[in-house]
Amino acid sequence: MKKHSIHIIKSIIPGSIAEEMGIEAGDQLLKINDNDIEDIFDYQYLVQDDHLDILIKKADGEEWLLDIDKDFDEDLGIEFENGLMDDYRSCSNKCIFCFIDQMPKGMRPTLYFKDDDSRLSFLQGNYVTLTNMSDADIDRILKYHLSPINVSFQTTNPELRCKMLGNRFAGEALKKVDRLCAEGSGIELNGQIVLCKGVNDGDELERSISDLTKYLPNLQSVSVVPVGLSKYREGLYPLEPFDSADAEKVIDTIETWQKKVYNEYGMHFIHASDEWYFLAGRDFPEADRYDGYLQLENGVGMMRLLIDEFDEAFEDVLEHHSEELQSINRSISLATGRLVYPCIRDMAKRAMDICPGLDVKVYEIVNEFFGERITVSGLLTGQDIIKQLKGKDLGSMLYLPENLLRSGEDYLLDDITVSDIERELGISVGIAKCGGRDLVSELFGFEI
């Protein structure tokens, strides 16, 4: 049996069918209804049936064939050691804009893994380039109706895509979108274009947007994000940062196309990430222009949502908590990245203006680790936070945004933990959720 076909059971949910049938942690799942199982999607598809023949290999090597009758879609209560039930597929591209290639040596090994797995696109929202997908993979996506799939397009110019992805098959891979978006497929996609100055911007961006509109309505949205450039680019493709004039042109292009597409489809489709509006010094679009915030993870609409949620919660405080505001005696600090610092600073000032006993210090953390061109808070490191806040007035509590931390963990990109920061700065650290209502609650110290 191939290594990737070995599915070790991690745990059994108490009271489940699996527990009733004597399945235990450490057992190995071999087959369902005489079908081999490649990954989690095979498993989820096969266990939906109301009658199952489950072949299990016990820890002592004995094989059990279990006859199970259950309700359709009823879960067995099995959790596996590997959530994907297969090896992760690594990226075979050599993209000119890849951020992993721009990281310094010596970080934890998992940070250098480049995934390009359509299954992670469905499960976790990761973006895939399609170069790692076979016709059989497309067949499985259509069979299991895995949707949405997130695709990194970069450009629809086949020759240019080969150059940008460093893969001679990258242009040909675009044809897979035709199958995914074929009439009746039912598959929804979201797209991404990482824009590189002098490479896929200008006329090439116009071409890409025009080409991608042909996949509407299956392709629900496409984000355009500026390439992230760290200070570790020696020996890599020469890329330049965008300036404010560049950002103006990108926004104008995108907003022109939004009007065209909206008139025909009732959706805006193509979206500029928040960084473009920061760089251009323009106001963020109104909420309706984001089509339900389909691309928040790409930084598209995060600031508009934050501002609107903050404003709503702020009005709630004024209307329902005016007495509580008068009794607050609170001194805290917030640390964030350069990109959103002005907005957070202004929100803190608004809070202090209505609450005499509130003192909030907002600190802008410059990303010295990756370089000053990296301005998002999610890529800040513990060492930069400690170095730049040492000796500062932090009040009784320092709040850091939760996107600094890996989900479920307490350490930052450089493996410095929240406890390390508390020890070095001599202060308690709170992890603040990134929503506007959450920010209001953190500022005033009570639930809104």
Image: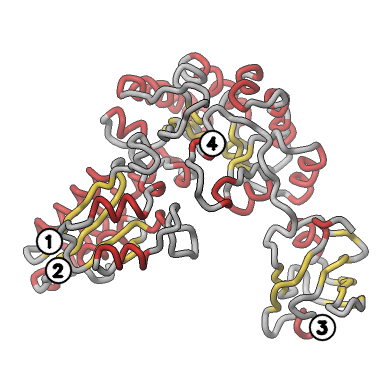
At a point 49% along the width and 14% down the height, the residue shown is: 203
Q: Name the residue under label 1.
A: 359
Q: Residue 21 carries which label?
A: 3
Callouts 1 and 2 close, C-beta under 8 Å: yes
Q: Residue 371 carries which label?
A: none
- Which mark is nearer the camera, 4 or 3? 4
Q: Where is residue 110 in the image (x, y as percent from the top left)?
A: 58, 52
Relative to residue 333, is residue 40 drawn left or right? right
What type is the residue that disc 1 sits on? Asp
Say which label, 1 or 4, has the lower sequence index: 4
The amino acid type of the residue labelled 2 equals: Arg
Apparent side of residue 285 relative to residue 110 in the rendered image (left or right): left
Write down the quadrant of residue 94 in the picture.
top right
Residue located 83% across and 78% down the image: 59
Quadrant of the rendering where the N terminus is positioned: bottom right
| Left or right: 254, with 170 as reference point | left
- Tell me: residue 286, above or below residue 311: above
> For this rendering, which residue is in front, 215 or 162?
162
Task: Name the side, left or right, on which 172 lies relative to 29.
Answer: left
Q: Whole-percent x and y of residue 148?
A: 62, 46
* Mark closer to the chain start, 4 or 3: 3
* Residue 293 image point, x, y percent: 45, 45
Task: Determine which residue is flagged by label 2.
Answer: 330
Up the image or down, 47 lies above or below 42; here it is below
Compared to residue 224, the image places residue 396 above or below, namely below
Q: Dot 4: within a 10 Å radius of its alpha carbon, few (fewer than 14), some, or many (20 or more) residues? A: some
Q: Which of marks 1 and 3 is nearer the N terminus?
A: 3
Q: Which residue lies furthest to the front in this view?
A: 106
